[in-house]
């Protein structure tokens, strides 16, 4: 297939492009050309801004995978150009779209966040992150109908990705693991490679609608024990570090966000590797001289 990836040179986007190329697809990248421009030298590149996507009018693609859709205005502009130039549009959304942060077992059809009255569509703030993803999903559905999918994920773990990077770094260097979240905090994450494969699968199969692309729920204690078992000598866990890498409230007001139901995604073809495999691969990646990137926000 001819695939257009919006972004594609950092974090999860790298895995998407790697998976697409490994499967023999013809990939085009659209980004600003500033992040890791040396990657994928054989791939066609379109350089431009999301706010001025006119260069996208020069081609047609079987599928689009949008890894850089944060601003509502920018996503709207890209969608308007690509509406009649692609067969299917897969949007990387977020578990931050849900109105309730405490309800366990939410499906993709739980209530979503409203758009704040008067909020700007061309500015990014963390307060608008969830509402912006909701608004982008809505406008893409209005534009593409059943030719679009929204993939909602939270913590994405693996090489090139910052989430849980402090654990991988600590275990690779024989240091104590740090976790400022409470030990019984429920948590869901997904391996970046599994998520990339799912994004590609949905695009190829043209499977529309929203999907909770998350793994099973663990407690932080159980997950930490799994990661610690990936090395010969298990280090201790510091539950009261000076730096908080997770930013999760201790009062349970965000627990429901990490107890989502993933049945629809599993039925659609999401495959999840066990956490121990993710941990071992991350540690190996660090041992090979790599440094986990800093969180984006």
Image: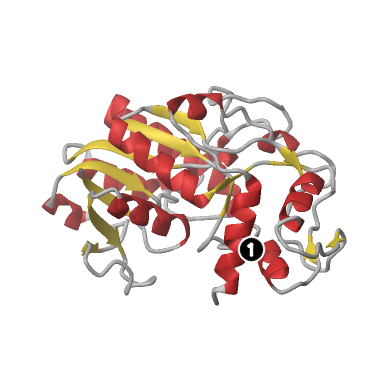
Mark 1 surroundings: few (<14), some (14-19) or many (≥20) residues within 10 A: many
Q: Can residue 281 be seen in this view?
A: yes
* In the foreground, 263 or 35: 263
101 vs 225: above or below: above
Q: Can residue 293 be seen in this view?
A: no
- Image location (x, y in percent) of residue 227: 72, 55
- Image location (x, y in percent) of residue 208: 36, 27
Residue designated by label 1: 165
Q: In this view, does 124 lie to the left or right of 216?
A: left
* In the foreground, 252 or 281: 281
172 vs 90: above or below: below
102 vs 200: above or below: above
The image quadrant of residue 100 is top right
- Image location (x, y in percent) of residue 250: 83, 47
Q: In this view, does 81 lie to the left or right of 50?
A: left
Q: Is mark 1 on a helix, strand or loop?
A: helix
Q: Check the image and tell me how it is coloured.
A: secondary structure
What residue is drawn where x is 30% and y is 31%?
205
* In the foreground, 100 or 224: 224
What residue is drawn where x is 68% and y is 70%?
172
Residue extending farthest to the front is: 232
Question: Which image quadrant: the C terminus?
Answer: bottom right
The image quadrant of residue 29 is bottom left
What residue is drawn where x is 15% and y is 50%?
57
Residue extending farthest to the left is: 58
* In the foreground, 40 or 122: 40
14 vs 250: above or below: below
Count of numbered circles on the image = 1
- Image location (x, y in percent) of residue 75: 35, 46
Question: Which image quadrant: the N terminus?
Answer: top left
């Amino acid at each position: 297939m001819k695939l257009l990836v919006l972004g594609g040179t950092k974090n999860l986007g790298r895995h998407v492009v790697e998976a697409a190329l490994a499967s023999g697809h013809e990939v085009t990248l659209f980004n600003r050309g500033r992040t890791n421009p040396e990657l994928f030298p054989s791939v066609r590149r379109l350089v431009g801004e999301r706010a001025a996507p006119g260069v996208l009018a020069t081609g047609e693609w079987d599928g689009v995978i949008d890894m850089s859709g944060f601003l509502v205005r920018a996503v709207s502009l890209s969608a308007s150009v690509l509406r009649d130039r692609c067969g299917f549009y897969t949007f990387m959304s977020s578990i931050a779209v849900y109105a309730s942060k405490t309800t366990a077992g939410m499906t993709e059809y739980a209530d979503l966040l409203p758009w704040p009255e008067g909020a700007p569509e061309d500015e990014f703030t963390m307060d608008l992150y969830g509402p912006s993803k909701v608004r982008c999903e809505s406008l893409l559905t209005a534009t593409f109908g059943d030719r679009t999918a929204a993939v909602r994920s939270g913590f994405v773990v693996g090489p090139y990705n910052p989430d849980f990077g402090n654990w991988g770094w600590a275990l690779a260097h024989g240091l104590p693991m740090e976790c400022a979240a409470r030990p019984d905090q429920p948590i869901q994450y997904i391996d970046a490679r599994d998520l990339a494969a799912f994004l590609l699968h949905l695009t190829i199969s043209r499977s529309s609608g929203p999907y909770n692309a998350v793994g099973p729920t663990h407690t932080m204690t159980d997950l930490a024990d799994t990661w610690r078992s990936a090395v010969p000598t298990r280090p201790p866990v510091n539950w009261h570090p000076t730096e908080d890498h997770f930013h999760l409230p201790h009062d349970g007001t965000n627990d429901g966000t990490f107890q989502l139901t993933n049945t629809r995604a599993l039925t659609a073809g999401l495959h999840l590797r066990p956490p121990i495999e993710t941990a071992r691969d991350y540690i190996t990646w660090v041992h090979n001289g790599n440094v986990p990137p800093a969180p984006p926000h």
